[in-house]
Image (cartoon, rainbow, N blue to C red):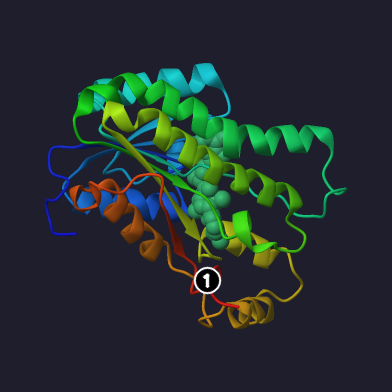
Amino acid sequence: MTAGELAGLAVVVTGGASGIGAAIADRLDRAGAAVAVLDVSPAYADPRFASFAADVSDRKSAEAAMAAAADRLAGIDILVNNAGVGAVGDVAANDDDEWARVLSINVTGIARATAAALPWLRASGAAAVCNIASIAATAGLRERALYSASKGAVLALTRAMAADHLREGIRVNAVSPGTADTPWVERLLHSSADPATERAALEARQPHGRLVSPEEVAAAVAYLVGPSAGSTTGSIIEVDGGAAGLR
Ligand code: NAD
């Protein structure tokens, strides 16, 4: 992506106050876009960006924040649905409330945020949506039953949305990261007795011997939402060190 490729475009990044979302906001800002961040914890957002409190799993909250962002940016051309939460355990590990909570954020949250942004996306003329899935959607990870189900649904939703909105000029794609070096993974490591050893083991389990960087995920998002990907919709880019493609 060349500097200024997104000049004049308005971007909303959900979950943009931390980790992958913060890297995406930074990348798209450096490509010239005006960026707004929607997050349940907006206090942690980079002060360069307009930031709005929103819980994407709450329809009213998502709608109000999206309208406020559109008002501030004078429209929405690009929506990055990045907000998500994890869940650990096999299929019996999480109770009904936890299944409802995680699916409501990771899956319904994408539907709600996108529905809330549609009036502005339809009016854009350069509209693109990018959803953040996960290697968990396709890899069959151990101890990630609920999380994997939620991310599999993100891929299905991406393709369905791409079909529905193609003729409205809205492209919809997804990026599927492998294990990435973010505060989320840092929290998981620090819940173990020996975080440094755990980190080394985690890195060794990755096909390319290291964690994915949030900036690598952000670069794929920047491509998919930009004019170079004008003929790309319903597609998934894996940024996972080869995990999905190698056996
Ligand atoms: P993170 O916890 O560092 O950041 C997630 C952000 O989302 C936080 O700022 C949080 O406040 C926000 N958020 C959480 N629930 C929200 C809600 N209901 N409404 C609005 N905002 C909400 O996590 P991360 O590692 O940067 O993950 C970002 C995305 O990338 C998630 O969708 C995650 O599933 C996906 N992902 C992460 C990894 C990884 O290894 N880190 C791998 C694959 C996919």
Q: From this viewpoint, is residue 41 visible?
A: no
Q: Position of residue 224 (x, y in %)?
A: 31, 51
Instruction: Indicate the position of residue 183 as horizontal and vertical percent values.
Output: 54, 58
Badge count: 1
In the depicted view, which residue is nearer to us: 211 or 243? Answer: 243
Pointer 1 local density, CA inside 10 Å: few below 14, some 14–19, many at least 20: few
User: In what quadrant of the picture does the C terminus appear?
Assistant: bottom right
Q: Mark 1 points at which residue?
A: 245
Horizontal side of residue 68 vs 38, given as left or right: left
Above or below 30: residue 76: above
Say whether residue 117 is left or right of residue 246: left
- Among the 4 quarters of the image, the one containing residue 234: top left
- Residue 48 vs 228, above or below: the answer is above
The residue depicted at 42 percent of the width and 18 percent of the height is 64
Indicate the quadrant where residue 84 lies.
top right
Q: Could one spot residue 230 in this view of the protein? A: yes
Give the residue drawn at x 58%, y 36%: 107
Q: Does the residue labelled 1 lie within 8 Å of ligand 1?
A: no
Taking the image as shown, residue 203 lies to the left or right of residue 102, namely left
Residue 221 x %, y %: 34, 53
Element assignment for label 1: loop
Screen quadrant of the N terminus: bottom left
Residue type, label 1: Gly
Q: Which residue is drawn at 28% across and 46% down?
A: 225
> Looking at the image, which residue is at 26% across and 49% down?
28
Residue 109 position by quadrant: top right
Between residues 247 and 110, which one lies in front from this camera angle?
247
> On the picture, is 197 further left or further right than 55?
right
- Seen from this angle, which residue lies furthest right? 92
